[in-house]
Image: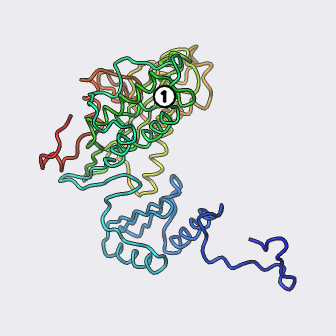
Amino acid sequence: MEQPPGYIDPRFPTHVCLLKKALYGLKQAPRAWFQRFSSFLLQLGFSCSRADTSLFVFHQQSNLIYLLLYVDDIIVTGNNPALLDSFTRKLHSEFATKDLGSLSYFLGLEASPTPDGLFISQLKYARDILTRAQLLDCKPVHTPMVVSQYLTADGSPFSDPTLYRSLVGALQYLTVTRPDIAHAVNSVSQFLHAPTADHFLAVKRILRYIKGTLHFGLTFRPSTVPGALVAYSDADWAGCPDTRRSTSGYSIYLGTNLVSWSAKKQPTVSRSSCESEYRALAMTAAELLWLMHLLHDLHVSIPQQPLLLCDNKSAIFLSSNPVSHKRAKHVELDYHFLRELVVAGKLRTQYVPSHLQVADIFTKSISRPLFEFFRAKLHVRSNPTLSLRGGVEDT
């Protein structure tokens, strides 16, 4: 900071105003707040995670405290209640904070304990989206997309593109707890610049599916032994009819719990299904590496190397054999880091049959029986506590 021009004190030209509190309107306010808060935590013995700078970890002998910071919203947990109470008292004495008790609502996510774990959903957020679209009383459907549907850029322009962009943007955040709609939302997100009437019909179908599964969310169950990292990787070769680019998808499990997933169109055209699957494997391997770094910062040990499952034997062969192949000569060199990981023993690749390839739900629209089977494998289901009370039935 410095004195503003025209108001410089000639006696103390190098002095500045004393900043007691960074205002929200200032550009440097977020950085100043984070610097102030992180320096306080570092003084108490916390360390900042290298994988996620918003995560702070306190580790002393067998005691652990995890703190997750998002602007001024904080989640704190630990394995020692006495140590946790001591830390929260220090936090209250340093900052004007309010203890809201056990985790129940955070950034639009609703967390509720279940008899065997934790259930996370976005019920209120999903209902608000339906209200905005005036579809709260619509007739529900069983799948978010028509089977084998591929959206194209052709068609008559939609009359209200602002509404389209608003609804699709809201649906993107809903995928935080609803991986079952990730592929459908990814498909409609590719036409934000010029939506057509057919695209809006696809958005309405997603909303009708959400109407029938309002109370659905992710379930997490604790484990007494450390679980292994298992990833499913898949690609839909040349699935986009306009650009002939492929769609990559993956789902990563820690033990039995789903911890990461993605549905994304690849940046370049692949000349073969082997190449598209190989690119998808590389993208999944990058996410696995990040998760391994994050678990290391959390002081969670992994019993064995992560396992990467794919339903394309050619891509698996290409990832584990350093042979120059005509189908991979043109693939960018940075994708071949996957091969180095496999050769170094840091990652294992294995074949999985297509009917058990969970990542299929992230790359293409599939039939209802297969969709519901994969959705169950993702642990997306209705709130168990509501089902026990008879308030909601699974759709």
202 versus 63 height, above or below: above
In the picture, the quarter occupied by the N terminus is bottom right
Residue 85 percent across, percent down from the top left: 34, 75
Q: In this view, does 352 lie to the left or right of 327?
A: left
**Horizontal relation, residue 294 to residue 323: left or right:** left
Q: Which of 128 and 159 is in front in this view?
A: 159
User: How many numbered tags mark residues here?
Assistant: 1
Instruction: Indicate the amino acid at tag 1.
Output: Ala
Query: Against 358, is 93 above or below?
Result: below
Res 215 seen here: yes
Q: Please give left or right for residue 317 compared with residue 142 in the image.
A: right
Q: Which of 273 and 62 is in front in this view?
A: 273
Task: Between residue 293 and residue 39, name the one nearer to us.
Answer: 39
In which quadrant of the rendered image does the C terminus lie? top left
Question: Is there any visible trace of residue 228 in the rendered image?
Answer: no
Q: What kind of element bears circle 1? A: helix
Q: Residue at x 46, y 20 (%)?
A: 151
Residue count near mark 1 (Cα–Cα under 10 Å), binned few <14, some 14–19, many ≥20: many
Question: Residue 141's spot in the image, x, y percent?
Answer: 27, 28
Classify residue 364 as left or right of residue 7: left
Q: Position of residue 148 (x, y in %)?
A: 37, 17
Which residue position is annotated with label 1? 280
Work out which residue is located at the far bottom of the displayed protein and give it.
Answer: 11
Indicate whether 269 appears above or below 75: above
Residue 91 locus on image (x, y percent): 44, 75
Q: In this view, does 222 lie above or below 89?
A: above
What's the residue at 48%, 64% (across, down)? 72
- Residue at x-position 35% and y-position 42%: 131
Foreground: 58 or 391? 391
Residue sitting farthest toward the right: 10
